[in-house]
Amino acid sequence: MSDPGTRSDPSALRFLIGHDLRVARERSGKTQAEAAKLLGCAQSRINALETAKVQQQPDDVDQLLAFYGVDVAYRDRVTSLAGRADQTIWWAPFRDVLPGWFRTFVGLEGLASRVFTYEPQLLPGQLQTAAYAIALLDGHLRVPPIDVPQVVQARMARQRLKDVDRPLHLRVVIEEYVLDRVVGGPSVMRAQLEHLLDLISLDNVELHVMPVTVTVHDGLDGDFMLLDFEQAQSIGYIEYPAGALYVQEAGQVDEYRMIADRLCGSALSDSDSADLIRDRIARLARVG
């Protein structure tokens, strides 16, 4: 990661390290008891390391990964994660308006180098304008009106598509219906669609619109995200109204990656998606 301090989140780092320790151990066929014997500690400590309940120390991480037969290059990458001393949480100013279950995701998103997301109903947060986000939160069941400005500020702060030092590489598939849901009224939606065109002209943004003519596709089971990291293994993320599920098994992550590729293949190309967005902008311009 080119500038890890800008999106520092120790809890998210512990999550990634613990995940990789568990996956490496299971792939090696070792038990937690065997790992505990190596470190001379109780088995409960190995479980705590894998579930991110305690801070993983670089020496312990390196010993365990070597014991599991992980190659030196990968060991060095994961150990470097454990060696980060910066304890500043970048999203701390927004702590009061971020649900506890959502804070882990915000931390992981900030550490990710690449993200894929399939959204059937709305534009993902990384693509939203402030006005669009405000309109989405109007009358929201779980966001009091007094918290809306800070929630929107947090959403804008998460956006990294135009980050000069470390831009997020984003790959998105949205349903055509999303373009026709006039969130906030014609003027807000028109500005949002113009913002989309600006973003998809960036080299690090790829957007595909799934036309309504494609009646059956792999996304019908629901929305999901994939987060890729330069120094840790990828994970999947599925959100529901009051929480989230993390997909961490390598085989399952690979399956979601295949689904992502198939969705992109079924949807319109980048250029055709841009043309469709321009068409919607023209329609809204006629409305006023």
Image (cartoon, helix red, strand yellow):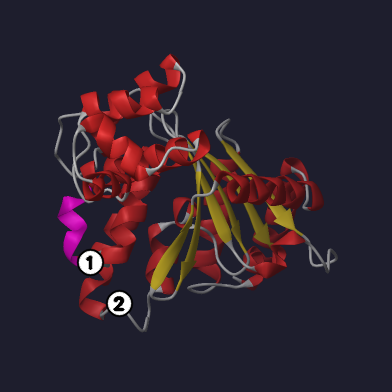
Dominant secondary-structure state across the stretch colored magenta: helix
Write the residue at 31% across / 51% down: 51
Position in image of residue 225 (x %, y %): 54, 53
Residue 266 shown in magenta? no
2 and 1 marks in contact (CB < 8 Å): yes
**Pick the front one: 261 or 121:** 261
Residue tagged by mark 1? 97
Write the residue at 39% across / 70% down: 243
Residue 92 shown in magenta? yes
Residue 143 numbered mark, or none: 2
**Pick the front one: 49 or 196:** 49
The N terminus - image quarter: top left
Toward the top, the furthest residue is 72
Residue 31 sits in quarter: top left
Q: Visible in this render: residue 216?
A: yes
**Pick the front one: 114 or 29:** 29
- Tell me the SS state at disc 1: helix
Residue 220 numbered mark, or none: none
Position in image of residue 282 (x %, y %): 69, 60
Q: In the rendered view, does 219 fall on the left or right side of 240?
A: right
Magenta residues, start to end: 91-96
Q: Earlier in the sequence, mark 2 or mark 1?
A: 1
Disc 1 crowd, CA 10 A, few/some/many (<14, 14-19, 20+): some
Write the residue at 70% across / 62% down: 219
The amino acid pointed to by label 2 is: Val
